[in-house]
Amino acid sequence: MNWHSILNGTLRALVGREAIIYSLAAIGLNVHFGYTGLLNFGQVGFMAIGAYGVAISVTTWDVPLIVGVLIGVGAAVCLALLLGIPTLRLRADYLAIVTIAASEIFRFMMSAPSWRDVTGGSDGLTGFAGDFFDANPIPGGDYGFGPWHYSARDLWILSVGWVAVLLAVLLVRMLMHSPWGRIVKAIREDEDAVRSLGKNVYSYKMQSLVLGGVIGAVGGMFWMITQASITPGSFSTIPTFYAYAALILGGMARVWGPVVGAMIFWALLAFTQGILDEAVANDLIPSSIMDSNQAGNVRFILVGIGLVLLMVYRPQGIFGDRREIALGER
Amino acid sequence: MRRLVVALVAASAVGMALAPGAGAQAPGGTPTTAAPPGATPTTAATGEAPAEDALIVSGNLRYEQDDEAQTVEGATVTVESADGEFSESVESDADGRFEVPVPGPGTYTITLDEETLPEDVGLRNERPSLDVRVREGRANTPVLFPLGFGDDVGRNVSSTLDRFLRLTVQGLRFGLIIAMCAIGLSLIFGTTRLTNFSHGELVTFGALMAYLFNVTFGWHILIAAPLAILVATLVGSAFDRFFWRPLRNRGTGLIAMLVISIGVGIAVRYTYNLQFGGFNRAYRQYSLQTEGLELGPVTIVPRDLFGMVLSILVLVGVALFLQRTRTGKAMRAVADNRDLAESSGVDVDRVINLVWAAGAGLAALGGILQGLSEQVSWQMGFQLLLLMFAGVTLGGLGTAYGALVGSMVVGMVVEVSTLVIPSEFKTVTALFILILILLVRPQGILGQAERVG
């Protein structure tokens, strides 16, 4: 067992690209679920529509990347309205069902051969991220210390990503300390009470759905721009549940909860993956039980079990306050 | 409950034995039922090596006349690029072959001039224009024009009414399967208010257990299927007794339970993947039926007909059970008003346990039927789950009959919609119907109007 490389991988994952992507996705979910109580199980749909908004507009219409990003944000807003209008007046589980269905259907549509010319079908699209890497002001070389050594390209990716996370956190923090934030939190606790105060609950829920969806879409854009290609296969239902796991791990209705959760979540994944890979490679686990492909499945299984255990024994997460997010009583 | 299980097992055993021609297994056929017997592709593209670096579009124009291969000479084929800048026409040679060099990668429209074909020869799919994508690194892009002689022409394209009828039957079959899987989902929701996102895994469980008994142990599917249903029923019951009931007793909230069911779903699904592998596999019996029974304009393989009859029998049985028996009444009572039922002396925990067991058994049966018609895969249940949700929501969350009606509608819509839209978008229609229903009648077709906001 090469503990050094396992530990290195874990520490790098703590601040890596995935931690950024899932921080953003989980911050969006925190707005939806943690603060407003909206059960959005299609966060990956927002990520996908944002990312495809960028990719398609840049490759099809040759617009600059920044315009593409705006189009992606606009697409995410439209998706939120489309999903919210029929469901936000209804009980929470209707939104859950419709969002998960919408995200899957968006994925089917993007991989459909009929629209191949625009979407690239199941092969996806490339060549839309040039502007992002051209804008890199960092001169070439090796930066960092300890386990964190990055090329100029990686450093650019990580800095942009963490700045985006920071902005999102500050935005959520500001909103949640405003009257708007108090109203959405009150909606989470007791919708009827808020309604009786003369507030338009439907409109507030919709604003929350749009805001969280856009933050998720930014996460999706960051994901696909930094890997410089996009495939519909990335947007299965799994990222949504990863984001939920990260959110619940860190603590819901906490400004920093989703960020810390995503960092720990990816560090844990990298750690278990490292151990499993090493164990399989060194024949500590007989290949009749598990080969290196199957080790990938084990990590999904662990995430599933982890999600269950967290919800059963510590629904408030690491930093959450049980009194504020009284999930157990709902 | 014991009575229901016995009834289910008996129904499946009797039904399977009675199914006409169910034992006939066509050797060496393809599992597709839509292809007319004896139709062979008459135009095949060959992958001959072209000149270096040049990209070509090519194909062979051939057809079968009295079981003998014939070639078409002198038919005109036109290749046009998507932007219209490139256009070239060629005539097929004595071997029926045509080759058109194209300037570069991109999308091209290939048109076969039907006027230039010999008399009585025509396209079997009535699509003389095809779009192909020429890619770099693939020198020869083959194009296929399926030609036929005489009666073969247009045979693949039946009238809209025929297609509608065929798709309706397919939709009925699919809807019945969804309904069977969804009744459990709806009843579990009705009795416990749990939106169970791991219900799809119960469907897969049934199909996989039947696969284990059928293929790994080598038992006949008629033995394997009832056994698998029995095991699924027991597992469903145990799942409730040792997992969900303790959670309910701890006072775990509904939304927390919902997230827990998702976690369970992920863990179980990838365990299937780990054990079963990522491939689609077929049962040993009945998977290769091609000899269809002709019922008017509709051709259906005995397997699917039998599946539909069995589904209807089981669903009627479930309805009678819910309507007539004490336990069935108790189930509906708990779904309707749990506290009132409890105070009237209904053993709520026992009823919920029975609902789980019956729901798991029905889901397993649905999974096995789906596995017979399509194939068994590790995520078949999860793929059905969204359609189940659509059906259940459509019919009214929590009602057994609503789940039935809603699922039938969803199955029909999904299949019949392929008349007008490409089949890859068929599930999209189900979502749009769902959204539409939520807009105009949020309680579902059979749900009671109540304030759900």
Image: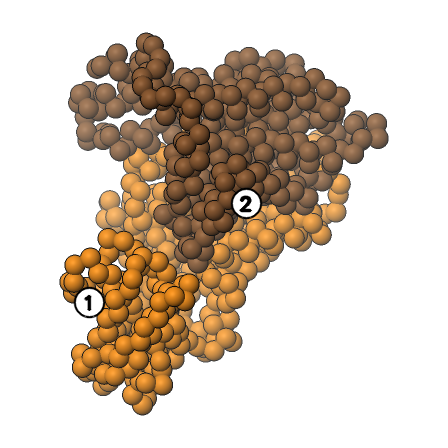
Chain colours: A brown, B orange
Closer-to-camera residue (B8/A84) = A84
- Where is B314 relative to A312, above or below? below
Q: Residues within 10 Å of mark 2 (few under 14, many from 20)?
A: many
The answer to whether residue A262 is above or below residue B50 is above
Q: Which residue is mark 2?
A: A102
Q: Is residue B452 above or below residue B147?
A: above
Helix or strand or loop: what does disc 1 sit on? loop
Q: Compared with residue B97, is residue A233 higher up or lower down, i.e. above or below? A: above
Chain of the residue where label 1 is placed in the rendered structure: B
| Figure quadrant of the C terminus of chain B | top right
Residue A17 shown left or right of residue A42 in the figure:
left
- In the image shown, does B279 or A31 lie closer to the viewer? A31
Marks 2 and 1, how far apart at CA: 42 Å
Q: Are marks 2 and 1 on the same chain?
A: no
Three-letter amino acid code at the position of disc 2: Ala
Secondary structure at badge 2 equals helix
Name the residue carrying label 1.
B46
Q: Position of residue B381 (x, y in %)?
A: 43, 45
Residue ranking furthest to the top: A146
Q: Is residue B97 left or right of residue A267?
A: left
